[in-house]
Image (cartoon, coloured by chain):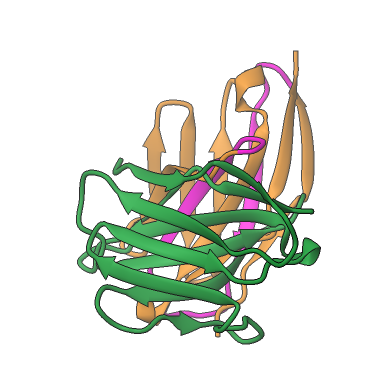
Amino acid sequence: GENVEQHPSTLSVQEGDSAVIKCTYSDSASNYFPWYKQELGKGPQLIIDIRSNVGEKKDQRIAVTLNKTAKHFSLHITETQPEDSAVYFCAAISTGNQFYFGTGTSLTVIP
Amino acid sequence: GAVVSQHPSWVICKSGTSVKIECRSLDFQATTMFWYRQFPKQSLMLMATSNEGSKATYEQGVEKDKFLINHASLTLSTLTVTSAHPEDSSFYICSAGARAYNEQFFGPGTRLTVL
């Protein structure tokens, strides 16, 4: 089955700086890679996603890049704000539409 | 994005009782619903996948007789924790997806505390 690894597990950045979270996956058949933001006590919220036929996608301050050859994808948050502080999860979806989640990154944006 | 609700958001029960958690897709028909369990500071652990009108598929190690899942309609799935014990205390999250797309939309979660 699929195996998704996520790094780093914790990340602290100064407000206004950029944050980058990276994930790798093992199954070359995986074709959908969403990123979720989870605030304390709440369910994960989809913030951006990318499919295997695209190399990069951007939505305002958030962008995701995908390297299918190397089997890794990254979340980029620019101009970070305190409200970006949360736990971020990557996921890879393989055949059968089963989600495989990364272990999560706790992001802290320091004002 | 699509909206998924869960009810209740928080429940406390006595050991030995059963608790039912509802998951609803509010503005789309969910052919598949997923139930996850999340421990503090950990990732989501898939418990089972349910397709409307058929039996749920449980992940290895998840007791199907303890965690009863019913997906009676395209907008509602329920998880019943039977004979709950303190070790069942956790954050339970459902998600819903449509067959034509890969996206899953998550509910807000249910915090279960078993005394």
Instruction: Tell whether position A24 is magenta.
Output: yes
Left or right for A6, reference A62: right
Query: As rendered, which of B46 and A73 lies closer to the eye?
Result: B46
Query: As rendered, which of B110 and A101 lies closer to the eye?
Result: B110
Query: As rendered, which of A95 and B26 lies closer to the eye?
Result: B26
Query: As rendered, which of A15 and A66 lies closer to the eye?
Result: A15
Determine the residue positioned at 38% across, 72% down: B70
Left or right for B23, reference A87: left
Determine the residue positioned at 60% across, 71% down: B82
Which percent across, then down, holds residue B10? 60, 42
Location of the N terminus of chain A (image quadrant): bottom right
Q: Quadrant of residue B38?
A: bottom right
Location of the C terminus of chain A (image quadrant): top right
**Which chain wears orange?**
A
A26 in relation to A37, above or below: below
Q: Seen from this angle, which residue lies furthest top?
A: A111
Instruction: Tell whether position A32 is magenta.
Output: yes
The range drawn in magenta is A14-41
**Which chain wears green?**
B
Which percent across, then down, holds residue B50? 38, 74
Determine the residue positioned at 45% across, 59% down: A33
B48 in relation to B39, above or below: below
